[in-house]
Every structure is written in C-alpha cells, then in structure tokens.
Image (tube, coloured by chain):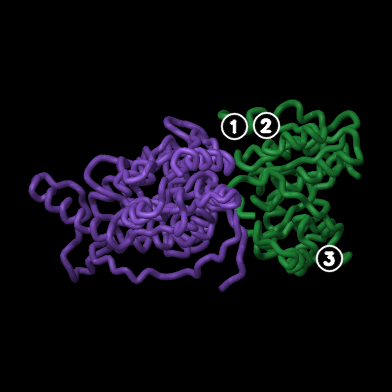
Chain colours: A green, B purple
C-alpha cells in the first residue's frame, strides 16, 4: 500500500465515485485517511457532494476552499500538504483529462518522494475513449501535464443506469489492448455492487462499488 | 443501431449537432455549458468544420448570423447571462428569417446568478427574448437521448421555417451522463434558395436584411411571419403524457424537473393518489390544446419548476383557468426533491379532492 493513491482519467470516467469508494474502504484498515479533491476544472459532481458520508466515516476531506459555493475559485488550499505528512494514507481525485491533471503537477516531486500509485480510470463506453488508442492518448496527455507516471489501469466500464454484468465483461478486450499498448497492469475491475459480472484473474481485483449521491432525478 | 455510449449532455448536444450537419460553431465559455464549446473545439477541425471562440457572446451570435446567411448549419451555445447578451442577435436572426440553433444550458439568475441548474429563463425563451414581434422555436429535452434527438430536429425545424430554434436545457442536463444511441450522420435535404452563397452569375443576388424603413412593408413582413407561426402552432407541438388517463392531479413539468416529478408521481401512486404528468417538449409552440383537454377530467394542476412560477401562467392560459393551478418550485440553483413535490401533492389532495 503506497502512501498516496491517485485516480485520474478522462472526463466522466468515474474517478470521483471510485475515489470516494476507495477512501471509505481504506478507512476500514487505516486510522488516518484523507480524500483530496484536486478537481478545480468542473464545479459539478464532485467529492464535496459526498461530504456527509465521508465525515461520518471519519475520512478527512480536503477540497478546493469554495467548492460548491458561489465563488468557485480554481486554487487548492495549503491544507493539501497534509497528505505528505503524519500517518495519513491519501486518495487523490484528479480533474478530467490533461487540463484537470495540471493541478496535480505542482506536487509531483513530493508525491514521488513519499511513494504513489496512479491509476488510469477507463470506461470503454465513454464516447471519446471508445478506441484503446484514444485512451492511450489521454493517458500520455495526463502524464505529461502531471509529471507523474501511471502505475495501473482500472476497468470502470459502465452505461450508467443501463449497466449490466455484460457491460463490464465486454470491455475485457479493450482493457487488454490498452494494457498491451501501455505496459500497465489491469489492477481492478469495478462495477455497481448489485451486478455480478463473471470476472477472471485477468480482470484484476473485483471491486464492487456503491454509487454515492443518487440524485432525485436519477432513473434507477 | 450502433452500441450505446455514455455521454454527458453537453457532449451529446455537440456531437449530434455535428451529425446533423452543423459545420460552424461560435462560442464563448460559461459554466455549466462549457463542454459544448470544448467538444466542438476538438471535433470541428477533425471534420473540416469551423470552431471559433469569439471575443464575447455578442460576437458569437453575429458570427452565427453571417454563417447561416450562407446556408451553412450554424450553432452557438451559452448559459443564462450569455443568452441575454445574444438576445439582440437572435432578434436580428428572426427579423432576417434566418435559421440557427441556440443552446441555453440554464443556470440560476438574475444577474450573474449562480452556476447550478435552473429553469428561470422560461419566460425569456418563450416570450421576452428580445425586441420586436417574433417567436423562436423552443425545445426542452429531459434526458441525454432526447437532447441528441432534439438537436437534429431543431436544425430541421429551423431550416424548414427559417427561424431560430433554441434547445432549453439546464445545468443538470448539461452535466449528467446517460447512455445514448447517437444518430447516424445525415445530410439535410431542405433547400435554401434564399442563401447568400454565390449567384454563379445565374440568378439575381439574394439579400439578408432586417431593416425596413417603410412601415407598411415591415407590417406585411411581420404579418406574413405570424401566419407562419400559426402554422407551426397547429403542426409542431410536442408533448408527452404519463398516467394522465385517470389522474385527479396533473403535474405539468418540462426538462429536468419532469424527471424529479416522475419519481414523486410513483411515490404518490403508491399512496393511492392518482397523479399524472403532462410534459411539454415544445415550450414554443406550447401544447395548449392537449393540456386543455386534460382539464375536462383532472381536478387540479401542479406546475413543477426550478423557477418562481413562470410556466404556471401558460398552464393557466391553456386551461382557461378552469381548474386550480398550484406551484411546487425551488430556484436559484436549488433542485427540488421528489419529497417536496410529494408534500405539495398531499396538500392539494387535502384542499381539492
């Protein structure tokens, strides 16, 4: 277990929800867990929406100071430094694409010094990453913007409320292609906990996840 | 049909516009619609189209005016304050009988307001957008698939009737993701003999203009345009009904709030209260006749809005105030919950049923 685990990837690949799930899971094994929201690109659908659940579980949330307020200023608080010290293990939720990863880059040296995993979250059914080559391109753009290297892939393929077990397993060839092209291992396959995809060891760790923040307009 | 893909509302609007033949997009960033412009910036150069980030919303809408004058399918998008800035240009488009698609991903207002979802531009879109006697078509999707489908239709309707068409969404629809089946790319067959795209020395030159110094000329132009509007009101209304056949209370809601209302209706039905929903898809032309028919059987109506009671006036007009019309609403970027709607339904049941 590295001190810092980073979730990065394309817009809408599911980074934020995975980061919330990961932080809550980590809290069951570690006393001091931080979820650090570095998304200063998009003011909608962010970790701040899950603040109550996180705080109840005892996860410390560090997010842009004015997140979800009237002044959404694109800067990160000095408090981010907490992820490098003490007994904390941290999960970082990065903004989408390379533009979101720029905010991460300023901490690259310190992140490397304490040790990290950076996971590329992929959804094979997201329109601008339908081709493995498109996913690889975004990967390179994020690495270049953040000055950090990815260490693994996560298959988070889903179709929202129309997801089935097959939606998850149909992405196997896609993930294999990305893995082959990048040399990165597929470390986990995540899926809504009510689905039971038939996974094999090649899919990595099976990771059933909860969907936090089910809104009033949701169709499921 | 191709496999479904997962898309954000803003991306879906942009991609289906391209598939409907949009080749010019002029924009200016504003939350919560910025992804439309970001998407266009990436895709337009790949397909030989033009993406241009204008220096302001005012410039963007006038670039649309120029592009669409040549017969090219052109689009712009913004959110509430930006639409206000485009208003003058939209009036010029209407006055010059030019087609164009304008997207409003509405946020809380007035003024700079907020950045969270709202429906408080209803009156602006359907009634008071800008100066002069005119209408624009207003289409209100309530999901990502419908956003895809209506963008295509908006281009066709705009070309057919030579007038601007607006897709009125909100921050929620712009930002949320849902699975969609994208339409296949298609070419429009609608002829544009009026376009200023070169005479080839074979015809008299066309003129695109909204200035008429002689009042009798202008009056005739406006009257003719209104005859066209009447035709549209007769032929182009769209709506959807949900469990209205036996409904004592009919909720009227469009866009995002219709999704929330749907969940409230399910909860009310579980309690034995007969509630249904009438969802206008065209906000102009407003489906007055269809709504008025429901007043024959329903005992009360409930307008559910993310605004301070704007559409409620159209509901009252449509049913000629034959039944009481109530309001359940939040505004300023606050999103009403199914429970808040359910509480209002229970209150109406106590008062009316």
Say which residue label 1 marks.
A72
Say which residue label 2 marks.
A64
Q: Secondary structure at mark 3?
A: loop
Chain of the residue where label 3 is placed in the rendered structure = A
Which residue occupies the extreme top position in the image?
Answer: A78
User: Where, quadrant-wise, is the N terminus of chain A in this rendering?
Assistant: top right
Q: Residues within 10 Å of mark 1 (few under 14, many from 20)?
A: some
How far apart in space, not on screen, are marks 3 and 2 (Cα)?
37 Å
Answer yes or no: is residue B100 visible. no
* Earlier sequence position, callout 2 versus callout 1: 2
**Pair 3/2: label in front:** 3
Q: Residue at x 68, y 44 (%)?
A: A213
How far apart in space, not on screen, are marks 1 and 3 (Cα)?
41 Å
Q: Are marks 3 and 2 on the same chain?
A: yes
Chain of the residue where label 2 is placed in the rendered structure = A
Q: Is residue B173 left or right of residue A214?
A: left
How far apart in space, not on screen, are marks 2 and 1 (Cα)?
8 Å
Residue A208, by quadrant, is bottom right
Give above or below for B163 relative to B344. Answer: below
Image position, residue B28 (x, y; %): 46, 43
Checking the image for residue A14, the label placed there is none
Q: Is residue B27 left or right of residue A38?
A: left
Chain of the residue where label 1 is placed in the rendered structure = A
Towards the viewer: B342 or B352: B352
Image position, residue B226 (x, y; %): 20, 53
Q: Are marks 2 and 1 in contact (CB under 8 Å)?
A: yes
* Earlier sequence position, callout 1 versus callout 3: 1
Q: Residue at x 86, y 57 (%)?
A: A205
User: Where, quadrant-wise, is the C terminus of chain A in this rendering?
Assistant: bottom right
Say which residue label 3 marks.
A199
Answer yes or no: is residue B329 visible. yes
Image position, residue B8 (x, y; %): 58, 53
């Amino acid at each position: 277990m590295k001190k810092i685990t980073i979730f990065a990837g394309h817009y809408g690949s599911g980074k934020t929800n995975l980061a919330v799930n990961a932080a809550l899971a980590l809290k069951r094994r570690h006393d001091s867990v931080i979820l650090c929201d570095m998304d200063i690109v998009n003011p909608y659908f962010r970790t701040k929406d899950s603040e109550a659940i996180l705080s109840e579980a005892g996860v410390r949330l560090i997010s842009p100071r004015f997140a979800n307020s009237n002044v959404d200023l694109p800067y990160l608080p000095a408090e981010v430094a907490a992820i490098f010290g003490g007994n904390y293990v941290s999960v970082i939720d990065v903004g989408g694409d390379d533009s979101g990863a720029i905010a991460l880059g300023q901490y690259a040296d310190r992140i490397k010094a304490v040790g990290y995993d950076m996971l590329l979250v992929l959804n094979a059914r997201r329109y601008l990453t339908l081709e493995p080559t498109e996913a690889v391109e975004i990967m390179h753009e994020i690495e270049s913007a953040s000055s950090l290297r990815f260490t693994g892939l996560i298959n988070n393929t889903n179709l929202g409320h129309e997801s089935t077990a097959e939606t998850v397993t149909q992405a196997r060839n896609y993930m294999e292609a990305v893995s082959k092209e990048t040399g990165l291992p597929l470390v986990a396959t995540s899926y809504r906990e009510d689905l039971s995809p038939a996974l094999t060891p090649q899919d990595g760790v099976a990771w059933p996840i909860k969907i936090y923040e089910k809104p009033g307009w949701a169709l499921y | 049909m191709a496999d479904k893909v997962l898309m954000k509302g803003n991306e879906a609007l942009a991609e289906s516009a391209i598939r409907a033949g949009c080749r010019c997009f002029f924009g200016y960033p504003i939350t919560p619609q910025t992804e439309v412009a970001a998407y266009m910036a990436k895709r337009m150069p790949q397909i030989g189209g033009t993406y241009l980030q204008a220096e302001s919303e005012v410039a963007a809408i006038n670039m649309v005016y120029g592009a669409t004058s040549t017969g090219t399918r052109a689009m712009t998008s913004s959110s509430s304050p930006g639409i206000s800035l485009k208003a003058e240009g939209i009036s010029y488009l209407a006055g010059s009988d030019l087609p164009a698609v304008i997207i409003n991903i509405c946020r809380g207002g007035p003024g700079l307001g907020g950045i969270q979802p709202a429906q408080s531009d209803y009156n602006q879109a359907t009634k008071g957008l800008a100066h002069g006697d005119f209408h624009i078509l207003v289409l209100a999707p309530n999901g990502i698939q419908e956003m895809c489908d209506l963008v295509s239709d908006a281009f066709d309707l705009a070309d057919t009737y030579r007038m601007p068409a607006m897709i009125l969404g909100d921050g929620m629809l712009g930002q949320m993701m849902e699975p969609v089946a994208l339409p296949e790319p298609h070419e429009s067959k609608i002829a544009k003999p009026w376009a200023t795209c070169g005479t080839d020395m074979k015809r008299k030159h066309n003129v695109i203009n909204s200035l008429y110094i002689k009042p009798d000329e202008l009056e005739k132009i406006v009257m003719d345009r209104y005859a066209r509007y009447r035709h549209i009101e007769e032929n182009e209304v769209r709506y959807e009904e949900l469990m209205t056949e036996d409904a004592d209370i009919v909720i009227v809601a469009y866009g995002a709030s219709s999704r929330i209302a749907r969940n409230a209706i399910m909860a009310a039905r579980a309690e034995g209260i007969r509630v249904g929903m009438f969802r206008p898809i065209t906000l102009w032309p407003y489906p007055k006749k269809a709504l008025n028919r429901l007043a024959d059987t329903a005992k009360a109506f409930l307008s559910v809005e993310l605004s301070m009671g704007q559409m409620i006036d159209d509901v009252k007009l449509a049913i000629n105030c034959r039944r009481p019309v109530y309001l359940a609403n939040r505004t300023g970027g606050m999103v009403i919950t199914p429970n808040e709607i359910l509480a209002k339904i229970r209150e109406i049941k106590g008062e009316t049923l």
